[in-house]
Image (spheres, grey):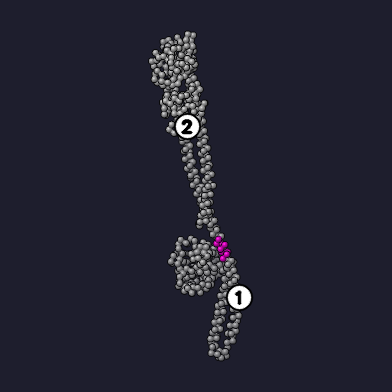
């Protein structure tokens, strides 16, 4: 395949690959982006619902404990609650349902304990200066932030005020931080999930799963969280991309935060992406291979058809030139035949005039008689040449003739005899006299033999040798033209029948002879093959069927 067809094959291949693979990969990318977007929306919705659910659970937890203390404060009297052993019973009743209260105390308007039940010794503590005490006295009900207090342990309290006729007093209970933390951390999802609460100042109210302790400062400003429940993407202090749900607790100025590494829920999607990429690569290889294969087949077939068309056009042009040459040769032969006929008649008349009296009258009679015979011989020889020229030029169109292959070979040899004798090239005829008569085109056969003989003459050196052999086999007749010339290099064997390919120098050959001969033999139903080795010569084999197709 020459450069033009290689370039055409590359262009067609690139176009075919682009037309087939670009839509394939664009479709794959669109599918991946669609599922990635769908999964992200699903994860956002899941995290949003989880944050809403946990924030409602926290609000319900706080509301239930506050309601229990309010109900207790309004049902029981101060005297009853401060009587010995009563608060112990109350604390047991409160924790019967859920173990969420650590201790409970009754505090008067001055911040002094009137009664206390719990694991700490706080009976003598005064809470008059504590923030939660002041807020409770002011608002009636208060849930504190987490603080250390007198016990030095992070905790928060729920306190309610009761207004008696004599003086107000406060019922205060401490919430178990572990119970509350477990409630919040139940919102953690997966291996990277984190759930915690921060107050408005950004301090942890429950212990986070990763990176922080209670009362430590969170690594972000809670003011970034809009009201309600929202899911956003943000980066943590380590640069990880997090999907975070913010939910403000309505009954307390707290922010519930649920974090999740955005790469964790994407793991199945990444696995799907790897499988999709593998499938796309395999599909691309299959489609690309099919495109390349079929395009190369198409271009190869196109090149063969172009070569066949060029050969046909060359053969037609050659045939047209032969027709013109044949007409010219016929005209020349006709013009030569007329004076030849006159010379022959005159020579015959002169021969008739040679009688015994004429022979006796001159001493040159023998020479005269000999010259007349020579004139007649050369006239006959010239007439034979012109007749062969007419026979070669008369028929250019394919036709079915009854042919003796040996006669056609002999006629072709007569055309090269003079040049062979001039170059001292030996022409050897090994013609089988028992060849069968076949049906073929005599003129085209003669054209093939002449071309092979001319090529052999060009190949052999001075005093070379050309052997023409004919034989029969079960399929027809085989004629070989063998020379002891330079031979044909092996790398040129595949191109020897290509149109316009020649090993001769510029101006010495058109490269169409063997191509036309090969085409003629295919048209006659036969074949033209060769064997050759550099320096050992070449053998062309013409195989002719008994009957032309």
- Residue 234, numbered circle: 2
Q: Position of residue 255 (x, y in %)?
A: 48, 25
Which quadrant holds residue 444?
A: bottom right
Can residue 88 be seen here? The reply is: no
Q: Is residue 313 magenta?
A: yes
Q: Is residue 400 above or below residue 247?
A: below
Residue at image position (45%, 68%) is 485
2 or 1: tag closer to the N-terminus: 2
Q: Position of residue 519 (x, y in %)?
A: 54, 63
Q: Is residue 265 left or right of residue 384?
A: left
Badge 2 vs badge 1, beta-carbon distance below 8 Å? no
Farthest residue to the top: give it: 166
Q: Residues within 10 Å of mark 1 (few under 14, many from 20)?
A: few
Q: Residues within 10 Å of mark 2 (few under 14, many from 20)?
A: some
- Residue 335, numbered circle: 1
- Residue 164, numbered circle: none
- Which range is magenta? 310-318
Q: Main secondary structure of the magenta part?
A: helix
Q: How far separated are the C-alphas under marks 2 and 1?
A: 108 Å
Q: Is residue 9 above or below residue 461?
A: above
Closer to us: 530 or 205: 205
Residue at image position (59%, 74%) is 333
Q: Is residue 456 above or below residue 116?
A: below
Q: Secondary structure at mark 1?
A: helix
């Amino acid at each position: 395949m020459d450069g033009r067809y290689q370039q055409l094959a590359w262009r067609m291949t690139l176009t075919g690959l682009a037309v087939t693979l670009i839509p394939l990969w664009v479709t794959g990318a669109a599918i991946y982006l669609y599922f990635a977007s769908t999964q992200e929306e699903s994860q956002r919705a899941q995290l949003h619902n989880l944050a809403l659910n946990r924030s409602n659970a926290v609000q319900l937890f706080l509301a239930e404990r506050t309601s229990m203390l309010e109900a207790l404060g309004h049902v029981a009297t101060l005297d009853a609650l401060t009587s010995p052993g009563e608060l112990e019973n109350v604390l047991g009743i409160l924790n019967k349902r859920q173990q969420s209260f650590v201790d409970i105390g009754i505090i008067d308007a001055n911040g002094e304990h009137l009664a206390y039940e719990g694991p700490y010794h706080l009976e003598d503590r005064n809470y008059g200066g504590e923030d939660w005490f002041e807020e409770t006295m002011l608002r009636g009900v208060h849930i504190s932030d987490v603080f250390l207090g007198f016990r030095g342990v992070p905790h928060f309290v729920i306190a309610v005020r009761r207004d008696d006729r004599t003086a107000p007093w406060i019922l205060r209970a401490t919430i178990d931080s572990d119970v509350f933390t477990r409630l919040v951390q139940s919102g953690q999802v997966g291996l990277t999930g984190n759930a915690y609460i921060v107050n408005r100042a950004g301090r942890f109210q429950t212990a986070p799963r990763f990176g922080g302790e209670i009362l430590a400062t969170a690594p972000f400003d809670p003011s970034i969280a809009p009201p309600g429940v929202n899911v956003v993407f943000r980066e943590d202090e380590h640069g990880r991309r997090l999907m975070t749900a913010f939910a403000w607790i309505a009954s307390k100025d707290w922010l519930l935060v649920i974090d999740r590494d955005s790469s964790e829920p994407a793991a199945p999607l990444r696995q799907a992406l790897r499988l999709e990429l593998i499938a796309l690569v395999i599909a691309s290889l299959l489609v690309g291979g099919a495109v390349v294969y079929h395009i190369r087949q198409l271009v190869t077939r196109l090149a063969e058809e172009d070569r066949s068309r060029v050969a046909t056009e060359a053969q037609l042009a050659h045939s047209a030139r032969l027709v013109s040459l044949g007409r010219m040769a016929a005209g020349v032969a006709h013009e030569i035949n007329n004076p030849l006929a006159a010379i022959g008649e005159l020579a015959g008349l002169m021969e008739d005039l040679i009688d015994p009296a004429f022979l006796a009258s001159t001493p040159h009679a023998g020479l005269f008689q000999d010259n007349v015979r020579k004139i007649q011989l050369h006239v006959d020889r010239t007439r034979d040449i012109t007749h062969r020229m007419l026979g070669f030029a008369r028929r250019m169109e394919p036709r079915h003739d009854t042919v003796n292959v040996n006669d056609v070979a002999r006629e072709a040899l007569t055309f090269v005899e003079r040049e062979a004798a001039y170059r001292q090239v030996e022409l050897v005829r090994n013609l089988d006299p028992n060849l069968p008569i076949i049906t073929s085109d005599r003129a085209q056969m003669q054209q093939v033999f002449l071309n092979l003989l001319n090529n052999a003459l060009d190949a052999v050196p001075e005093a070379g040798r050309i052997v023409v052999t004919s034989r029969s086999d079960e399929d027809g007749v085989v004629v070989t033209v063998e020379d002891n010339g330079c031979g044909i290099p092996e790398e040129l064997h595949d191109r020897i029948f290509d149109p316009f390919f020649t090993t001769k120098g510029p101006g010495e050959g058109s490269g169409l002879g063997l191509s036309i001969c090969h085409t003629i033999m295919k048209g006659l139903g036969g074949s033209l093959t060769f064997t050759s080795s550099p320096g050992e010569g070449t053998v062309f084999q013409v195989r002719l069927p008994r009957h032309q197709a």
